[in-house]
Structures are given as C-alpha cells and as structure tokens.
Amino acid sequence: MKKDKKIFHRVDADEKLRGKALFVDDIYMPDMLYGRIVRSPITRGILNKISIPEQYKKKDLVFVTYKDIPGKNCVSSVESDLPILTEREIRYKGQAIALIAHKDREFLEDVLASLELSIERLPACTDMVDSLNKKEILVNKDNIFRRLRIKKGNADKFLKESYFKSERIYRTPHQEHLYLETQGMIGYMENGVLNIKGSMQCPFYVVEALELGLGISRKRISVQPTTTGGAFGGKEDFPSLLALHAALLTMKAGKPVKMILERGEDIAFTTKRHPSLIKQELGFYKEGKLVAARVKVILDAGAYETLSKVVLSRSILHAMGVYECDNVVIDGELVCTNTPPSGAFRGFGAPQSMFAIESHIDEISSKLKMNPVDIRRINIIKPQSILCTGQNIGNECILPEMLNDALKETRYITKYEKNNIFNSKNREMKKGIGISLFMHGNGFTGNGERILSSRAGLTLKANGSIELLFSNIDMGQGCNTVMIQIASKALQIPPENIYVGKIDTLSTPDSGPTVASRTTLIIGDLIYKASKKLKRILQKSSPREDDFNKKAGKYISEHGELTIIEDYRHPEELSFDDETYQGEAYRSYSLGCNIAEIEVQLDTFQIDIRKFHAYYDIGTVINKPLSEGQIRGGIMQGIGYAMYENLIFENGVVRNNSMTDYIVPTAMDMPQINVKFMKNKSNYGPYGAKGLGELPMNGPPAAINNALRQALGIDFHSIPFLPERILEVWMKKNE
Amino acid sequence: MNDFIKINFWVNGKQYDLEVPPLKPLSRILREDLHLTGTKEGCREGECGACSVILNATLINSCLYPAFKLNRKDIITIEGLQVDEKLNPIQEAFKEVMALQCGFCTPGLLMAVYYYVYILKGDCEDRIQIKNAIGGNICRCTGYEQIIQAIESLKDKVR
Ligand code: FES
Ligand code: FES
C-alpha cells in the first residue's frame, strides 16, 4: 500500500477543466481592433521606404512606423539592441518594420499583401560558421557580440602532459518551444493608464520595456498577465516586443488592440533555443582521471544580442557537466547571424553543454577500454568537490549515491553486457542502454538574484483569508499551487483559506521573472518567511489563543488588514565575481541521472525507446504529482530535441513553420518513464527544496546518444538523431 | 464580398440561428459568435487537437469544419461536459492525477477522451489504444503519462 499523504490539487484545475480559464485570445473588448506586424521580406538590407497603396489609406487603417515611437526605439533586455520597429537596418527576415490594425482581419491580410516596400538587399550570413569565417561583417569587427571565459589551474600544461587526449566538436540546432498557446497581447487605454493583458512569464520585464520604449512612467502602465498557455522560456523575452507593438497601436488608434500570432508566424519569428558549436579537448591520466579540459562554446545569438549573454554564461558554467577537473579553460562566444534573435528556452544554454560533455565522456570510455560507468565514477563531483569557478559543491552533493541507485535498480551493467552479446548475434535489430548524468544551477547566475531583489508577501484580509502577493506566473508548472502549499504549511491553516492575488504590476510586488528554476526556491522562501512573520505577529497579539481564525479576527478588529512584504536577502556566504567568473555561481545545483534503453531496427533506423529511467535530486519534493508532471514534460521536450525536432532554416528563415512539419512527440512516441526522487535536503530554499523546471531538459539527448553508441557502435556529435541521419552514419561505418 | 449564409444548429443542447460567412470555421463561430471560448485554437490547420469537439457523435477538429456544413448538426463542446456544474468523471480523473498543466490543450483532450470513453466505449486498460485515442492531441507540457493514468483510472467509473 502506498501511504500517500493528502494530494494537494492544482488550484487552477477546475477553471481549466471547465474551459473557463481566460487566455488572452478569449478576451473580447467592445470596439476592439486586430493588430498585425509588417515584416521584412528579406534577410539583410536597408529599408528606404514603406508606403500603403492609396486605396487602403482611408478605411480607418491604423498604421505605425518607428516615427510613432515616443520613447527609445529598443526593447529593454540584458543588451537592449533589438529595435521595436526598424528604422533602416534590417538584420533578419521577419523583422518588424511597421504595424497595422483594423477591425476586420481579412482586410489586414489584403493590406499586408499589397504594401509597397523599397528595400536595398545586402549579402547575409545565415549560418554561424559563415559568420565565424567573416563571410560578411554584420556587427563589430568579427561578428562576435561578446566573449566570456572561465579559468582554473593550467589547462595548457596538463593537456600536453596527459596520457590520453580527445578532441571533439558538437553541434546542436535551434529548438522551437511550441507552447500550445501562441503569443498574444491586448492593449487598451483607461483613464490615462496603458493596460496590457497577455501571455507572458515576466510582467515586470514588460513594464520595463514599455517604460523605455514609450517614454512614460510605470505609474501609468498596468500589465496584467492572462492565463498563460505554456511558455518554456519562449514567453520570457519576446512578450516585451509584442506588448510594445500592441501599445503603439492602441495609443495611435485610441481603441483596444488585440494581437495574436498565427502559428506559422510564431514558429518562424519568435525566439528559439540557441544553436551551438562546442569544441572540447579533454586530457586524461592513464587510469581514466580527467586532468585537463579546454572547451569553447559558441552560441548563435541570431541578429541581435538581447539576453544571449546570460545564456552563454550558463552554457559555460555547465560546460564541464558533472565532472571535477583541476585544469580548465572555458571560452564562450556569442556570434551574430542573420536569423531571428535566439532567446530563453528551458535549460537556458545548459542542455547544449550537457549533451556535448556527456556524449564525449561516454565516447572516451570505450577508447580507454573502460565501461561508461567506471569513467564516470572516477570523475563525477562528490561532496566537497571544487567546480570550475572554485565553488565548493558542499556536502549535499549526492551524485555518487544517485548513480549507484540508478545502476542497481535498472540493472544497467547486466543489461549493458547482455546487449553486447545480443548485438554480436543479431543482424536485424540492435539494442543499447545509455546513461547520462547532469545538473542544473538553481536561480539566477552569480549576483543575479542580488540585483533582482525580489519582493513577495501576503495580506491578511478582513474576512480572515490570506492573499498571496507575488508576480510570478503559473504557466502550467503549478507555482500558484506550490505557493499556497508553502503558506498553508507555514501558517498551519487549510489551503482553502489562501488564494493567489491577481497580478497587476501597479499594485503587485515585483518578485522578478518566472525563469531559471527560481520560483519555488526564491519566491517560495519569501512566502515562507512572510507566513512565519504573520504567524508571529498574530501569536503576539493573542498569545493564549490557538485557533488561527480567532487570532486573525482579533487582530483585524483591532488593527485592520495586514500586509507583509519580504525583501530578498542574498546569503552572505555566497559571492561571485562577474569579471573573473570565480565564486559561487549558483546557491545550489539540482542533479539528475537518465538511463535510456533503446532498440533500433536495421531497416527503418528508427529509435524505439523501450524504457526510460529518470533519477533526480531536487532537494525536498514539495508536490510530488506536480514535480513528476514537470519532469515528464521536460523529458518529452528533451526526447523531442534529441530525436524529432528539426527546424529547417533556409536563407535565415524557418521553412517548416507549421505543426504539420515541425514534429514534436505525441502520446504514441512517449515511452513509459520511471521517475524517482532521491532523498536530500538543500540548505537553501523553503523546506529544503531545490529548483526543478529546467533540469529534466538536460539529460535525454546524451542518454539516447549513448544508448545509440552501444546499439550501433557509432558516435553522434549532433542532434537530432533522425532515421535518415542514423542510416547515413551507419552506412559510412560499414563501408 | 463575402456572402453570409443562414445556419441552424445545436450546441450543448441549445439551438442557434446564425448568419455567418460560409467558410468561417466552427472553432471561430464557437469562440466569436457564441462566446464559448473553452474550445481553443493552437494551429488552425488540424494538427494540434486543441479545437476538438464532438459533432453528431464523432470527434472533429473544429478549426477545419466550415460553416456551410453546419446546418442541423449537433455539437458538444467543453462547456457542455459538466452536468449541473459538477465535474464529470473524466474531468475529476484529470484533476485527481494532475493530468493538466497550462491547460491550453485540456479542453480538446477532454473531448477526445469523452469520445473514446463514452461514445466508442473504448478500453480503459489498454495503453496502446488509449495512446491512439489521444494521438491527435498535442500536449507540450505534460509528457502525456498523467493523462494516460487519468484515463486508466476511469475503468470502473464510467460504465
Ligand atoms: S486548432 Fe484545430 S487542430 Fe489545431
Ligand atoms: S497542459 Fe499545456 S499543452 Fe497540455
């Protein structure tokens, strides 16, 4: 019998199950217009003129160009280099050059089809290799937006002295989020206040963008996120741009304007996961100890830098995977290409790095005549290991234990040996078992959380209920449920008495963006502290009373409602140097181990995942079914990234921009996944919890690659593993 | 320009008379003319299943179903699933095992499950058949396992 504790249901389950939850496209306003984006038809060039044919000019068409932008023509980000609407320079096909709005959608289609553009074409670099080779110079002297470096020990010296050296280059492509709800925004003016409703992860990023682009004070901006239909990072940065577009149109029109991207537009022109090119040189001692590493991680930022620097930073900080190495130099480069700006996507630079290092280590094991497990045992981080930034991982690192459990419970070694025998005898079908170990740093990198200084809290309402105040978005991951759960436990009151306040940036405290696996960890902790504070205050006002309602009632009758807001405080013992990349890059690291068991038929070359085992250390698990859901969804996206998802770019634009042609896993493609949580407790985070959202994305590609290596004896250095590519490599090998 | 046609049809037991352009898809008619926004549009090309509804006892993608074919048809949407405001057993099962995350695919999925369980009288213990039944519905959040578990849990509850 399972002795499951009471399940904490999703607080949004009922409205979503009844079809009552309001997503942005479900909102209709009287007199509302529809807005569309006029996009560049060319990949690179100079815009000289755009005009509307005479016959469309009257007919109430609202038309906006960069000349209508009252503030600065840029979208605020880490690097605010993306223009809201282009003035002259065009750097990617699909770049926004003007906006139109009208009440009739069909009419807008006609206008889009007949706009007159005068554009001068320039030669483009649409591939990162072309950019690196300076085929054309797009930005700076060398097409590089930025360089970052991490250094520890003396990699050059020890690489020279090592017994065995291996050099490999890995490549990963774009990945599309394919959240089921496309991007959308509604803008309208009310009493001099600009209202923006829409699908987003980071309401205050949107506020900052509107403030800068429109040149108005945030006191006149109210951003209210609607139910958000999936995001996965895709609604971190892009909504700022779309909100600006909706705002410009509504301000010019004097009417509400709704903008919903068509699926084809959404796939083609919103942000994607950064393509990468990762070069690794690893040096080993004879017994398999990794002694030195020289790594170069190059990410394709697309046409503008936007937030790519922080993605690169996470990439290089995860470049060594879960391995301890005394002599390391890791270089990161952000390259510009004439493609849509890359952006945030679950994992944020780490999945690329993890795929490379986990595949490489596995490949080396066979060169060193070791099995894939022994090489890992020797090199993985353990309690007190020192990471490449000099950070001591501390005592909570239970990776060796996790590895042991996973090997034992899946009978990995036995299966590995059996597969070898099976494969030597069988000509129609081959079997493989592959392992990957991975981690993910929790929260913003380095000083990020200190700078964000999140605020969150609660109000004890007049009727005795508790309203939670924070501005993170429940985009499906379930943070509203988790926050109520944390408050309910801390206050020892039933969850029914607690609810999450509706977010309006004019009144809700800024608890930072909903990204970086930080919500439970950072905001959960603030909610925990605010709850404890409330408890203390009520205790003081009626020391002899046990019943919460009575205590609350007494307090309210004497003092009225009470709001408590907690300010984030960075743990004093954690410090990080943004210049040298030394110090505590992350407060805690979540860990994982994936084991994939596959079969490959030698006629179809399709990978059939028979079993998928998934082990995690996310500290204390606050809500098990929710966590399992996050993990299964993340694994599915990882499997998609590894095996199916193949965005085809042609001249800098996506050719297969439809759900028919961009293949993601369906129910039929998914193996049964055994999810297991290790028992562990973090020093940071409420009740010992760690971050979870991004971690599951990091494991599947390498686990599948390593299974493929055993099955077919081939080494893949790029994803996705499409049947036609597997066949090609297989043929080459057997020539 | 676009001529309008008159149509008469049933949605969730209620009769409607409308004048709409002949090619307007059912999903848009539901969402814009009838304000039944529970039915979602994820692709408008018949690929994601978010717009699934029941039409004359078959499961269809309403984004591909034009107005001119709608006359006299009988439709059930997500808004028609619950009786007297109580969740029906499928919705209960989804809630119980957390078979939803962002919820955007959920209405369409519930219609597909409704079709499988109540109309086809499908087997709730056969995972392959279950997967087939929801094979036309893309969910980008859950990884499907909890959805399958929800359907499995229905085996004693719906007959
Ligand atoms: S909206 Fe109809 S199938 Fe996607
Ligand atoms: S729950 Fe988000 S798409 Fe299914």
Image: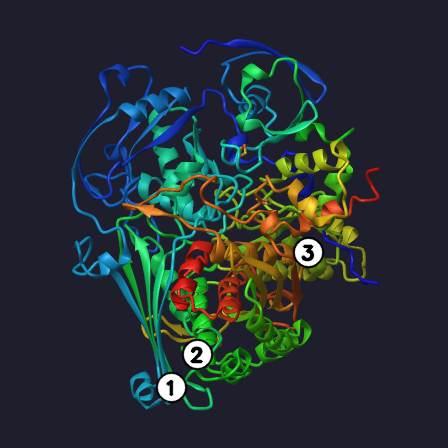
Could you say whether the residue bearing mark 3 is in a helix, strand or loop?
helix
Chain hosting mark 1: A
The answer to whether marks 1 and 3 sit on the same chain is yes
Q: Nearer the viewer, mark 2 or mark 3?
A: 2
Picture residue at 52% right of the left edge, 80% below the top: A376
Three-letter code for the amino acid on which mark 2 is drawn? Ile
Q: Secondary structure at mark 2?
A: helix
Disc 2 sits on a residue from what chain? A
Q: Position of residue A93 (x, y in %)?
A: 28, 41
Residue highlighted by disc 1: A164
Mark with earlier residue (1, 3): 1
Q: Name the mark nearer the viewer: 1 or 3.
A: 1
Q: Which mark is residue A625?
A: 3
Q: Quadrant of ligand 1?
A: top right
What distance separates the C-alpha of mark 2 from that of mark 3? 38 Å
- Location of mark 2 (residue): A364
Q: Quadrant of residue A596?
A: bottom right
* Residue A494 in view here: yes
Q: Quadrant where the C terminus of chain A lies?
A: bottom left
Q: Is residue B66 above or below residue B144?
A: above
Locate residue A616: give its quadrant.
Answer: bottom right
Q: Quadrant of residue A683?
A: bottom right
Residue A194 percent location from the top left of the image: 42, 34
Q: Position of residue B76 (x, y in %)?
A: 68, 26
* Mark 1 within 8 Å of ligand 2, using the beta carbon: no
Neighbor class of circle 1 (other Cα within 10 Å; few <14, some 14-19, many 20+) is some
> Do marks 2 and 3 share a subunit?
yes
Q: Gap between marks 1 and 2, in whole Å?
A: 9 Å
In the rendered view, tell whether residue A521 sits above or below residue A321.
above
Mark earlier in primary sequence (1, 2) = 1
